[in-house]
Image (cartoon, rainbow, N blue to C red):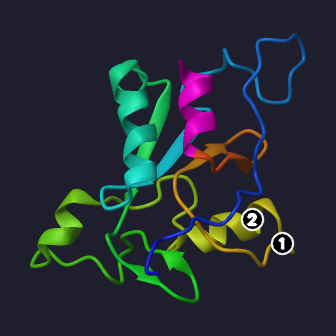
Amino acid sequence: DGEFVRTPVVFRNKLSSEPNAKFPLVAKPRRYHLYSSHSCPWSQSATLAVKLRGLEASNHIGITYALPIRDDAYGWEFITKDNNTDTDDDKKVCSPDPNYGMSHAAKLYLKADPEYTGYVTLPILWDTHHETIVSNESMDIIQMLN
């Protein structure tokens, strides 16, 4: 019937205030990074949560924006030196991956889980300390940051 049905998420870890938590809620600046896209409504809700809480401005969470296109094989694409041209208006609102220089979100999924074969979605809340995905569920990310 043409309705988009999002696939179930695989990465559903939580930030925690518990002592010795794997993903501590209170962490060093820029430990967590949000990979998002202006063209994905689920990503935008997570991005708004980060921005409204002042977490990007206070240097707690970095944000990288993917291009508004999806490659069927690799998913969301980030700006790289190979695809960055000043003539493309879409690329002016996107950014490169500052953590690893990845070209696509799928490569982050494979870094987190080399056996991953599922669908690549945004947003991704990434832990730079453990080099893995904390969560790729927008509502979980919003609730953790609230």
Between residue 39 and residue 107, name the one nearer to us: 39
- Above or below, 113 against 126 in this view is below
Judge whether residue 127 can be spotted in this image: yes
The residue labelled by disc 1 is 114
For disc 2, the neighbor class at 10 Å (few under 14, some 14 to 19, many from 20) is some
* Residue 133 place in picture, x, y as percent: 71, 50
Give residue 101's position: percent from left, percent from top.
Answer: 51, 65
Magenta: predominant secondary structure element?
helix
| Left or right for 10, reference 76 | right
Find residue 18 and report its horizontal and vertical position in percent. Answer: 85, 12
Q: Residue 102 has which mark?
A: none
Horizontal side, residue 27 vs residue 30: left or right: right
Label 2: element kind:
helix
| Residue type pointed to by label 2 | Lys
Identify the residue at image location x=71%, y=57%.
9
| Observer-nearest of 144 and 59 | 144
Q: Residue at x 39, y 73 (%)?
A: 80
Nearer the observer, 31 or 142: 142
Which residue position is annotated with label 2? 111
Q: Residue at x 58, y 60 (%)?
A: 100
Residue 96 lies, with reference to residue 138, above or below; the image says below
Q: In 3D space, how far apart are the residues under numbered discs 1 and 2 (Cα atoms)?
A: 6 Å
Q: Which residues are magenta?
A: 138-146
Q: Are marks 1 and 2 in contact (CB under 8 Å)?
A: yes
Q: Which residue is at a point 19% across and 70% down the rendered structure image?
A: 90
Residue 64 visible to the viewer: no
Find the residue positioned furthest to the bottom.
Answer: 73
- At label 1, which amino acid type do we have? Pro
Tell me where residue 56 sits by quadrant.
Answer: top left
Task: Give the x, y percent position of residue 17.
Answer: 76, 12
